[in-house]
Image (cartoon, rainbow, N blue to C red):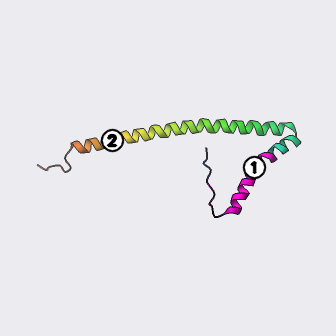
Amino acid sequence: MQKMQNMPKGNDAAANQMKMMTMLMPLMSLYFAFILPGAIGIYWIFNNVFTCVQEVILTKRIRGRQEAEQAAEAERVAAEKGEARGKPRCAEVP
């Protein structure tokens, strides 16, 4: 899922406009769904539900894969540090 970024505090006009759009866009979509043929409203609803489900599934899969990779990397780094502690820093030349 995409992270929403907070608007800078210094730009009140843009923040107010964003807040207004956040409230009005869903209302406009509902209005259009009621005045247009039924198939469009059904399509919008199905598309939004499908997109939400897809986003949740992909986010869980990607997050799980990233956590597994990070754990493997942490184990590799820990193993390398353990090996480095057991060996002398510079090898003696015979």
- Residue depicted at x 66% and y 35%: 53
* Residue at far bottom of view: 10
Q: Secondary structure at mark 1?
A: helix
Is residue 45 found left or right of 76 in the rendered image? right
Instruction: From the top left corner, tell me how far across and down residue 13 is, in percent.
Output: 71, 62
- Residue depicted at x 19% and y 51%: 90
- Residue depicted at x 71% and y 55%: 18
Q: Closer to the N terminus: mark 2 or mark 1?
A: 1
Q: Assess disc 2: are there few (<14), some (14-19) or many (≥20) residues with their C-alpha within 10 Å of its C-alpha.
A: few
Q: Which residue is mark 1?
A: 23
- Residue depicted at x 61% and y 37%: 56
Q: Which residue is mark 2?
A: 78
Instruction: From the top left corner, tell me how far across and down residue 10 is, in percent.
Output: 63, 64
Instruction: From the top left corner, tell me how far across and down residue 37 is, in percent.
Output: 88, 39
**Residue 69, picture quadrant:** top left
Q: Which residues are magenta?
A: 5-28
- Residue 48 magenta: no
Calculate the distance from the C-alpha at mark 2 to the C-alpha at mark 1: 50 Å
Instruction: From the top left corner, tell me how far across and down residue 17 is, in percent.
Output: 73, 58
In terms of depth relative to the viewer, which is nearer, 9 or 80?
A: 9
